[in-house]
Amino acid sequence: MRTLKWSRVAKFSNYFLPRRWPWIVGTAVGIALVWGLSGILSPALSQMGTMHTVMSQPENVIWGELFKPDSKPILRVKSGDRIMMETVSHEGILADQGDTVEFFTKAGITRDKILSDQLKVKATVKKTGPGPHVITGPIFVEGAEPGDVLEIKTLKIDYRVPYGVISNRHSKGALPGEYPENNAPIYTKVIPLDTQREIGLFRPSNGRPNIEIPLKPFMGIMGVVPANPEEAVNSVPPGIYGGNIDIKHIGEGTSLYLPVQVPGALFYSGDPHCAQGNGEVALTAIECSLTPIFELVVHKDMKLETPMAQTPEAWLAIGLDQDLDEAMKKSVRESLRIVEEKYGLTKQDALLLGSAAIDFEVSQVVDIVKGIHGVISKELLKDLET
């Protein structure tokens, strides 16, 4: 990088330029300033990819399943490009919630605040899978091949509506058969959002004071198309392809890394959340329509067998399995790999370290395939960085 030496410019103007030529000095300084700034700014500008916009119109979404290897891409991008992607929440448009307008207006949401794209999806998009999710995509990333890794950077997330929904359904959630009470098919609650204050208003049904839930938006589903089409028939279970991972830490300023399964990766996203507790025990988070901005980066020199994520503060070691015990084992093994590869500890030492200083959290227990993520503090291991 070229750095402008202001002391040299000053000496030149003081000792070698006639005082009657101030315009020469101004010109010289101007040229020097542009020259210096170009050296600073041009690398950043040259590295910034193209920005694309993807709308959540009916032809850009599917409902209930994931995309498959033969799905037609709605967009082709290059590694490093950015996508502003509209997403639609499924809560409020599912059959067991009745008429969508009535559902929301009875909860105090005025008709003009209801997202028109939700109504369009309900009216025009066929629900083709058993899952509840509305998925936007797929996006073909040029150069991405099986064996590569796709990094999904979540740069920013904006709210689309001032409401969210939490639901518990019969035979689902962490306590199937016990809740909803009295064998009701569904117990659901609309959550008004104050996006300026970043809170959601939980209104107890028995008259107790309202509870303000801090908002922390993230995308529940970010994925690449699985190589096996059978893994795409239901949008609910996550897998090595990502999908419905539901990890609340993967919001703005974070990266999710996924092993590419098919040419072009075929990225998609959906299941937007405004807030979620680890476990997601009722069945859903605060489901709310969001507009994330992603940057997609292909890594040719990186190998992964399972999803991995990082936040500014931590690495996330992800374990997925229908058996929660097995998901825990997979998360621990992944944490050992991360600590060994990134910080040089032996796996035996990493296991002891994990027992003392790594938190293993239940991501969710409600998506058929359950999730555990180990939170590996970067601050803890900063002196081991190479």
Image (cartoon, rainbow, N blue to C red):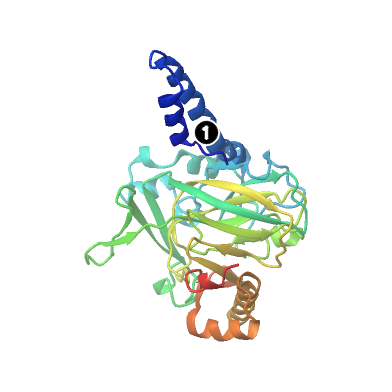
Name above or below for residue 24 compared with residue 138: above
Asked whether residue 359 is in view, the answer is: yes
> Element under label 1?
helix
Image spot of residue 123 (x, y percent): 54, 41
Q: Looking at this view, is 50 or 167 the one in front?
A: 50
Task: Residue under label 1, please give it.
Answer: 36
Q: In which quadrant is the C terminus drawn?
A: bottom right
Q: Nearer the viewer, residue 148 or 330?
A: 148
Q: How many marks?
A: 1
- Res. 365 visible in picture: no
Q: Quadrant of the N terminus?
A: top right
Question: What residue sits 47% from the left and 70% below the top?
Answer: 379
User: Nearest the camera: 221 or 99?
Assistant: 221
Q: Residue furthest front?
A: 15
Instruction: Quadrant for residue 205, please give it.
Output: bottom left
Q: Quadrant of residue 257?
A: bottom right
Identified at 51% across, 33% down, the residue is: 37
Q: Amino acid at mark 1?
A: Gly
The picture places residue 313, in percent across and down from the top left corner, at: 47, 64
